[in-house]
Image (cartoon, grey):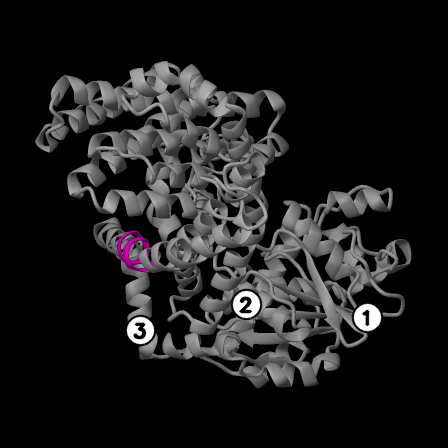
């Protein structure tokens, strides 16, 4: 299929197909409309970044194109440039507008109308508007805009049939007063009303495209458009006394530190109890112990053993301790898959309810101290699902400085969902004091690393600008669909890497290389970390996949202190091969190598520090002596933060 020559984003458009373009502000529900019209699933999220790429799908003989969520079409950023080029080449634009944020969203609507493209408006979130006490005169809104307006509720698919039925009733609307004559004079020069508008607004890309100087009328045109939108809003919207709904009050409480932090801790505690205790204990006990180890593995060993001796090299590789058909399948399906499904279920709940961007707002001040803003919480939280995926989403951050900090912290301190599940399962049986030690150490490393990077790297954190969607009860079908798709992608990505890891480890074992590596690393593992030499195997496995390495610790006979040391080290250890490759892709080779090497050094430094401190304060391993170790890490963190602040005060150029 030939690429569309009118669109500067490379899209494959069949000959003769009409282009139906979806446009709207972030979090208006565009992706739900896209799924409905095309039958294709696209990740529906309440946080910025998931629609940076452009998705297209078939609608009969025509094509539907989903653009990034934007507040305007210009050359201010990549998202707006992509949306601009696609909208200008559209046969019609389906503009999804939030009834709750109508005053904000109509600015984009009016700008699209000013381009002269046929438009139909889906006035979405009508249920949220009613709950917030907002009444919209839909007919009057349609009359003032000059285009069809259809009320919808995306989560319930209300109004969707009408949108599909009336899609081609889209028509050019009423342009902003005073622009018609100016646009008409430029049409002969640039060819289309849309490019004439953007030329007037001073878009440098459009001006360069036609070999002329950009206009200087942006501020004036924007002011006229804003006045026009304000006038429409005053005429069509009426607010009632129902505006303070429970959801609105709860949403405000979620972003206030005094109430939001306890709510966040409660949510994380519920997540830990569900994943770390119930799934890691009860569910995995059935899937791994009863089903995989009790039924599957004996059956596979018996079947394969009829053809290949278990003591032979092929037998060891297939059904041995690290066998492709035994340990790989058991770890993947019996141990990791239930934990991954549980994590993605909770993440989908946070996304679908609108809680995730409120977490970003809540932690903005904290993240600013480590060189990020609240938007940085998005890749950090996504990292608990998959560090590889989260590393890619650091593209939504404002500067290279923030991207470097986020990628380093992801690779160093954030365990992925599968690894976190194994860690939670191992910590759950140790007692609260060991859980506290683990969490304190990882948090301390995150704060120290972030503060040091924020101090040493030039620049400062950008201000947080993020959309807060209405707080709503998550739709179970949407949550289950997202959980299923993300879990499937995990399985699809993890299975070959697990198989590769098992093949490497079992080959090393058969060839005697594994024992040699264990001896080589003994000064680190047995001496500095005070762990069994066999722990080296878990670290080697962790390079293939972090969760693979963490799962390898479950078979070792470790006391509680050794378990914490091993888990801290494996958490801080280098990310898996897939993440390393993405880091090298996203950053320069020098930066990526530095991130990788620093993670290795930090992991063994911190793990060994815990081991040596526990030897010093608790020679017999008594749990009550963990308190001094925690105090040392707390004091060390405060010292690093204090010195960095002092350094910034006397070196202001570091933040400029």
**Reading the chain from its start, which is encountered first: label 2 or label 3?**
2
Vertical placement of 643 versus 127: above or below? above
Mark 1: which secondary structure?
loop
Position in image of residue 296 (x %, y %): 45, 57
Q: Which region is colored magenta? A: 274-283
Relative to residue 103, is residue 65 drawn left or right? right
Q: Is residue 310 magenta?
A: no
Separation of marks 3 and 1 at Cα, in angstroms: 42 Å
Q: Reading the chain from its start, which is encountered first: label 1 or label 2? A: 1
Residue 421 in percent (x, y) is at 36, 48
Report, in whole angstroms, how far the alpha carbon at label 2 lies from the one at label 3. Answer: 21 Å
Specify the quadrant of the image occupied by residue 589: top right
Q: Residue at x 15, y 17 (%)?
A: 616
Q: Quadrant of residue 69?
A: bottom right
Q: Residue at x 66, y 74 (%)?
A: 37
Residue on which disc 1 sits:
18
Whether residue 395 is visible here, answered yes or no, is: no
**Main SS class of the magenta portion in the image:** helix
Crowd around label 3: few <14 · some 14–19 · many ≥20 (10 Å): some
Q: Which residue is mark 3?
A: 245
Q: Badge 2 is on which residue?
A: 29
* Image coordinates for residue 283, horizontal then vertical, percent: 33, 60
Q: Is residue 374 above or below residue 177?
A: above
Q: Is residue 446 left or right of residue 196?
A: left
Q: Nearer the viewer, mark 2 or mark 3?
A: 2
Residue 346 image position (x, y, % from top left): 38, 59
Of callouts 3 and 1, the N-terminal one? 1
Q: Nearer the viewer, residue 73 or 562?
A: 562
Residue at x 44%, y 64% (from the top left corner): 352
């Amino acid at each position: 299929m030939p690429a569309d020559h009118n669109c500067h984003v490379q899209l494959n458009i069949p000959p003769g197909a009409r282009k139906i373009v979806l446009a709207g502000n972030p979090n208006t529900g565009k992706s739900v409309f896209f799924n409905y019209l095309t039958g294709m699933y696209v990740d529906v999220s309440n946080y910025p970044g998931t629609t940076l790429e452009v998705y297209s799908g078939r609608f009969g003989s025509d094509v539907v194109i989903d653009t990034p969520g934007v507040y305007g079409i210009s050359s201010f950023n990549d998202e707006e440039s992509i949306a601009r080029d696609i909208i200008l080449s559209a046969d019609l634009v389906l503009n999804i507008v939030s009834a709750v944020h109508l005053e904000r969203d109509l600015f984009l609507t009016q700008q699209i109308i000013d381009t002269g493209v046929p438009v139909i408006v889906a006035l979405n979130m009508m249920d949220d508007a009613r709950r917030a006490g907002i009444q919209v005169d839909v007919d009057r809104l349609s009359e003032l805009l000059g285009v069809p307006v259809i009320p919808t509720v995306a989560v319930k698919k209300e109004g969707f049939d009408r949108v599909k039925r009336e899609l081609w009733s889209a028509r050019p609307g009423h342009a902003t007063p005073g622009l018609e004559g100016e646009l008409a004079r430029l049409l002969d020069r640039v060819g289309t009303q849309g490019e004439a508008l953007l030329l007037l607004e001073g878009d440098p890309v459009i001006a360069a495209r036609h070999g002329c100087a950009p206009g200087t009328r942006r501020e004036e045109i924007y002011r006229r458009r804003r006045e026009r939108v304000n006038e429409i809003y005053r005429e069509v919207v009426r607010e009632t006394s129902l505006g303070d709904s429970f959801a609105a009050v709860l949403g405000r409480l979620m972003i206030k530190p005094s109430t939001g932090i306890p709510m966040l801790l409660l949510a994380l505690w519920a997540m830990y109890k569900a994943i770390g205790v119930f799934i890691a204990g009860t569910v995995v006990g059935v899937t791994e112990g009863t089903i995989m180890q009790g039924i599957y593995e004996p059956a596979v060993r018996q079947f394969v053993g009829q053809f290949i001796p278990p003591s032979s090299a092929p037998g060891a590789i297939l059904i041995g301790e690290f066998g492709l058909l035994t340990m790989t399948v058991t770890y993947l399906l019996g141990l990791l898959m239930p934990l991954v499904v549980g994590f993605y279920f909770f993440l989908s709940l946070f996304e679908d309810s609108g809680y995730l961007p409120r977490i970003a707002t809540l932690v903005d001040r904290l993240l600013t101290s480590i060189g990020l803003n609240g938007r940085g919480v998005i890749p950090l939280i996504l990292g608990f699902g998959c560090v590889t995926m989260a590393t890619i989403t650091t593209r939504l951050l404002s500067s290279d400085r923030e991207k470097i900090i986020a990628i380093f912290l992801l690779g160093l301190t954030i365990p992925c969902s599968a690894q976190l599940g194994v860690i939670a399962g191992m910590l759950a049986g140790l007692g609260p004091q060991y859980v506290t030690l683990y969490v304190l150490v990882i948090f301390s490393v995150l704060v120290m690393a972030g503060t040091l990077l924020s101090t040493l790297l030039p620049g400062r954190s950008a201000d947080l600008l993020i959309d807060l969607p209405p707080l709503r009860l998550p739709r179970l079908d949407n949550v289950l669909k997202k959980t299923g798709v993300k879990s499937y992608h995990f399985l699809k990505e993890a299975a070959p890497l697990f198989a590769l890891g098992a093949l490497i480890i079992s080959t090393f074992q058969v060839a005697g290389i594994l024992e040699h590596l264990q001896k080589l690393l003994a000064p680190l593992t047995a001496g500095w970390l005070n762990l069994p030499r066999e722990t080296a195997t878990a670290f080697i496995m962790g390079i293939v996949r972090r969760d693979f390495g963490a799962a390898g610790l479950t078979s070792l006979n470790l006391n509680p202190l050794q378990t914490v040391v091993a888990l801290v080290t494996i958490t801080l250890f280098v990310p898996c091969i897939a993440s390393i490759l993405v880091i090298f892709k996203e950053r320069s080779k020098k930066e990526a190598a530095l991130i990788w090497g620093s993670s290795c050094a930090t992991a063994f430094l911190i793990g060994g520090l815990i081991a040596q401190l526990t030897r010093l304060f608790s020679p017999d391993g008594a749990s009550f002596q963990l308190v001094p170790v925690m105090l040392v890490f707390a004091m060390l963190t405060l010292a690093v933060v204090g010195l960095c602040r002092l350094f910034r005060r006397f070196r202001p150029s570091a933040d400029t």
